[in-house]
Image: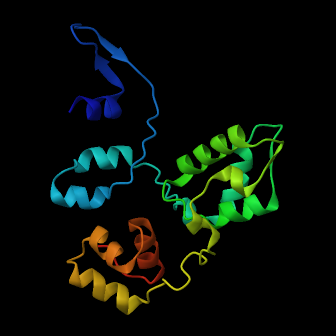
Amino acid sequence: MKLLRVLETGRFERLGSNRERQVKVRVVSATNADLPAMIRDGTFREDLYYRLNTVELVLPPLAERPGDIVPLAERFLASDKSLSSAAATALQRHPWPGNVRELRNVIQRAQLLATGSRIEVADLNLPRTAAAPRPAPGAGNDPDRARIEDVLARNHGVIAQAAAELGLSRQALYRRRDRHGIPRE
């Protein structure tokens, strides 16, 4: 694999050339795929994984970081616009299945629809479900160690299936598994 060689040596040849060139780059990559599972399944190269995985940052979905919603929304706002407190509350209650991209799009649309300098709830055009209070992250859906182990065993360690059964994202299940000291297999 040529990419692996470039990452290892910093050298490559252009297509059609016989002259080797030196390059110094940093590669930043992101995925929502479960790469360790893909390695086990043989669908992702283990050597490439270890070459790329120098620093791993796990960023929970926006729904699990309600404290970030309003600051992010304010960052996306034009300097002449602001959020009403009711709009900020509505943003925090929305589940954000589309994550930060969805929030950015909602704010951009609200700025276009707003008649004044203040964005109101109606300008956000959020689905009605956003008006119902969202439980705090993990509240009412924080399975104990035994339940997690049981669901993982029943699903033969397949994180995606176990997470779906528990009503969690894969990342949330990984965090809860780590919190309860359940070994990754």
What residue lies at 47% left-to-right and 51% top-to-bottom?
A: 55
Give left or right: position of 127 versus 185: right
The mark tally for this picture is 0
- In the rendered image, residue 103, in percent from the top left (x then y), is placed at 60, 50
Towards the viewer: 177 or 24:
177
Identified at 17% across, 59% down, the residue is 41
Residue 108: percent from the left, percent from the top?
65, 40
- Which picture quadrant has residue 122? bottom right
Q: How is the image coloured?
A: rainbow
Residue 42 x/y as whole percent: 15, 54
Give the percent coordinates (x, y) of residue 74.
74, 48
| Residue 139 versus residue 62 in the image, above or below | below
Residue located 83% across and 42% down the image:
116
Residue 171's image quarter?
bottom left
**In the picture shown, does residue 88 fall above or below 78?**
below
Q: Quadrant of the C terminus?
A: bottom left
Q: Residue furthest bottom?
A: 146
Q: Which residue is pictured at 30% across the width and 20% down the height?
A: 12
Q: In the shown orientation, is residue 99 left or right of residue 3?
A: right
Check the picture and name the quadrant holding the N terminus: top left
The answer to whether 117 is drawn above or below residue 58 in the figure is: above
Q: Nearer the viewer, residue 70 or 60?
A: 70
